[in-house]
Image: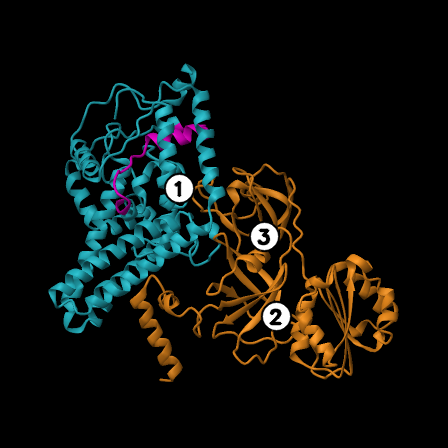
Chain colours: A orange, B cyan
Amino acid sequence: MTSAALRRRAWKLLEMVTTPLLPSDYLDLVSPLRAGADLRGRIEAVHPETSDAATIVIKPGRGWRGHTAGQYVRIGVDVDGRRLWRAYSITSPTNRRDGRVTITVKAIPDGKVSNHLVRRATPGTLIQLDQPTGDFVLPQAKPAKVLYLTAGSGITPVMGMLRDIEFDDVVMVHCAPQPQDVIFRNELHDLVADKKLRLTEVHTDTDGMLDIARLDELVPDWAERETWACGPAGLLDAAEEHWTEHGVQERLHTERFRPSIVVAGDGGEVTFSATGKTVDADGATPLLDIGEEAGVLMPSGCRMGICFGCVTPLKAGAVRDLRTGEITEAEPGVLIQTCVSAAAGPCDIER
Amino acid sequence: MTAIDPTAHLTAEQIEELGRELDAIRDEVIAGRGEKDAAYIRKVISAQRKLELVSRGVLLFSIFPPAWLLGTAGLSVAKIMDNMEIGHNVLHGQWDWMRDPKIHSTTWEWDHVSPSEQWKHSHNELHHTYTNVIGKDNDLGYGIMRVDEDQKWHPFHLGQPLWNFINACFFEYGIAAYDLELGKNLHKRRRRNPEFRARAKAVGRKIRKQVLKDYVIHPLLSGPSFLTTLAATFTANLVRNIWSHSVIMCGHFPEGVQVFERQSIKGETRGQWYLRQMMGSANISGSRAMHFMTGNLSHQIEHHLFPDLPSNRYAEVAVKVRALFQKYELQYVTGPLPKQVFSAWRKVFRLSLPNKKPKVKTPDRKQELVAG
């Protein structure tokens, strides 16, 4: 018998010992970051960067496969007891000696996760991790000239790049309301002092928003540069238009932080994605009834919200709890009780 | 069974107002759920796992009597925690709001021979929706007993004190059989029903796993302590079964608890549904440890009003609910465990004999609404 087969046998036996739990349920008690566990990380430190941004140092579990500069990672954090998932760019270099990774988070107004991470997260806390992902990365072949065009927290994936690989000729144009809002400002200025970076800060409170046409004056050779841009949608839209207009769009790489724009309304178009049906729903009829009416096979139970026999994944959009009026927005892993939930705008139910 | 409808003094408007007041209590807890609650259930789960691990470890040496005693006691408590405060409540969806897939009603499996999926259907859906409705709620006597004067007597019921005792000892098997509606489904035609067969197979699989673990694997691991470990796990299962049976019997069987006619729930309003839960359940009074060991089912009334609120909140909810009972002049059935267990058993004995059909029926909503 091969050793893999032997291990499988041993594991099967161990499962018989721990049933109905799994051996991992017990191992998680002592070693949540071990190889083979669900991927998690432990927050080891929180360093403030600006008044509303902080860098979180994370020790990832043994299953972490490593990242490429510019990628992001999805993390699941328990905020007020509720697990919420968000994506953040990785700001640490890929070759960090201690194997830790960092994300840098800017607290956005009313942002549940970002405010929690910046202001309340404490070392020792376990968080859930996904493997890093994203194609906003540097190419294998080193470009001769590089431009980084960033605004606000759009600097975070680019900082991961800056820390990872040195280029001969790098220019950065970064926008932030005021000098003290520039995340990593000291480090950027150190790079400038070491002549490793040419930096233009645009302070939008005094200078106004960056007019993309000003690039000609700020970085005259911008069109020759391989460019990575990250920031608010307005900036990226303008950049894409500008680069296309000059016929150099293949040199522009953009990363959009997808903002979760869920407009909670009253009723909407409901998609049952597994069955491929779409119907209109009002804001007062339970989604269970809507689905059944449309001929979708819906699990059901008490039909009054007490038995949890109808829970179904909400893939997109928002629903309203008909008992409390509470709005639930789609997030990975969110299940809703269809018998007491109505459409609060367009939504997608996995049935 | 009282000869007089204990809710007859309430008007239809009062019943709806009562419903609104209960909704407000529920909303308040829901709005306040948070980090503390999450920390509570995580702590309980972690403590249960550690206790079970240590107890099983100690039982490896169960050939020594002190180890046997300690290990058996620990394992009994661990099994009770698994079934009551954790399993029952997680499977009710009480912790689904945390969005932790590992502590969720759709993924949880418990140390019990009834697969959680089937139990959720018979318990959460049938029992909690149709609480104490004769012919709809199989929890009323689990199909083997007569627990209300209104139920038809049959010579089979003469033996019900014995059936109840056997059911207490092997309660988890009783529950599995009851989830399968064995009585109904063992008739020739139904036995071949593919859906029933699939469910029976699932129960068989679960029983095999549980039995293998408790009565083969762990005794074998104990080597020379094989027999004593076997006896220990058997004892722990027995203790857990008798304990949970006793607690659960106290929830709906003691004197003073009402049952309802099928007719009476037609077109039931939210207020009336709440009222039925209030009149159909009974509490157990006692210390915090006692509430914990019952999985907070000692707050059965509160649990039946709000089956999806986190169990650690029932104690605070109980104060408000009790005040409502007072305000609406309703009887809040509660008492210490021995008293409630005795009361339930007395009823089991009493109703093993036939009785005259009671003169006045239990709450008849139609009459009541006309009167209101």
Q: Is residue B333 magenta?
A: no
Q: Label 3 is placed on what type of residue?
A: Ala
Secondary element type, mark 3? loop
Front tag of 2 and 3:
2
Report the quarter where the N terminus of chain A lies.
Answer: bottom left
Residue A247 image position (x, y, % from top left) = 86, 72
Which residue corresponds to mark 2? A90
Q: Tell which subunit mark 3 falls on.
A: A
Looking at the image, the residue that sits furthest to the left is B65
Left or right of residue A189: residue A302:
left
Q: Give the CA separation, mark 2 to mark 1.
A: 43 Å
Highlighted magenta segment, given as a residue range: B265-290
Q: Tell which subunit mark 2 falls on.
A: A
Q: Label 2 is placed on what type of residue?
A: Ile
Front tag of 2 and 1:
2
- Nearest the viewer among A167 and B150 is A167
Q: Residue at x 21, y 36 (%)?
A: B340
Q: Give the CA separation, mark 1 to mark 3.
A: 25 Å
Q: Give the CA separation, mark 2 to mark 3.
A: 24 Å
Which residue corresponds to mark 1? B307
Q: Residue at x 35, y 57 (%)?
A: B45
Dot label at residue A330: 3
Secondary element type, mark 1? loop
Q: Label 1 is placed on what type of residue?
A: Pro
Looking at the image, the residue that sits furthest to the top is B371
- Nearest the viewer among B152 and B340 is B340
Q: Tell which subunit mark 1 falls on.
A: B
Residue B344 image position (x, y, % from top left) = 21, 36
Left or right of residue A127: residue B332:
left
